[in-house]
Image (spheres, rainbow, N blue to C red):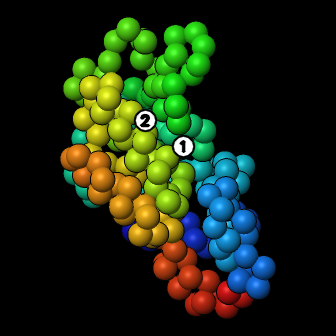
Amino acid sequence: MVNYPIEIALKGLAIKAIKLNPDNPFQWASGYRMPIYNDNRMFLFFPDCRDLITEGFNYLIDSLSVNPDVIAGTSTAGIPWGMSLANKLDKPFIYIRDKPKDHGLKNQIEGIDAEKNLENRNVVVIEDLISTGGSSARAVQAVRNANGNCNYCLSIFDYGLDKAVQAFNSLDPKCKVSSLLDYYTLLEVAKQNKIKI
């Protein structure tokens, strides 16, 4: 059986999708300066990485006993992973913008008719990574606002920040987060493989 966290950590470090630099921390969009930078878009270049992550998401769905009617990807980084999983599961796919468009039909959710909603379907949100959790929690709420049931958000990577836990706990009902790889597992894999931390 594949150990998805370890395999994804090893692949991410090898292709430099995950960079560690405690001496010169990276500036995140959130304003934080952190010793790690994670660019999951780099996994898209490699077919074996795409397969590994899609299979990993499928494993999470099975292990959580989730039976989604619809797979949703967050815009933009969650779209390819959500689409890949939807194809594997033969499920409908939608994607969620961070906020509604200010033109046209003013959609926030793409893939359903703007005059309709999700009609109480079970939706799993796919995210590439969770840092502070704000945009991911907003995506879950957008699904709920469109009359979808959304109690699971899956990601490739989770930094494990308290702020993200608070963001998901503030939802009513709370949303369960499950990730293929977390920060602490990544550090352990890096140490075991003598990668400079």
Looking at the rendering, in which quadrant would you find the C terminus? bottom right
In the rendered image of this protein, does residue 6 appear above or below residue 120? below
Q: Is residue 193 left or right of residue 154?
A: right
What residue appears at the point 52 percent right and 74 percent down from the top-left corner?
183
Can you say whether 157 is above or below 55 in the image?
A: below
Q: In the rendering, at what x and y percent does residue 154 appear?
A: 40, 52
* Drawn side of residue 111 relative to residue 187, left or right: left
The image position of residue 51, as x and y in percent, is 55, 51
- Coordinates of residue 70 in the picture (x, y in percent): 35, 31
- Could you tell which of marks 1 and 2 lies nearer the N-terminus? 2
Determine whether label 1 and label 2 are within 8 Å by CB.
yes
For image coordinates 37% across by 63% down, the residue present is: 165
Question: For the residue labelled by badge 1, is the local secondary structure a helix, a strand or a loop?
Answer: loop
Give the secondary structure at mark 2: strand
Q: Which residue is mark 2?
A: 72
- Give amino acid for label 1: Gly
User: Which residue in the structure is indicated by mark 1?
Assistant: 78
Q: In the rendered structure, which amino acid carries the disc numbered 2?
A: Ala
Q: Residue at x 60, y 13 (%)?
A: 103
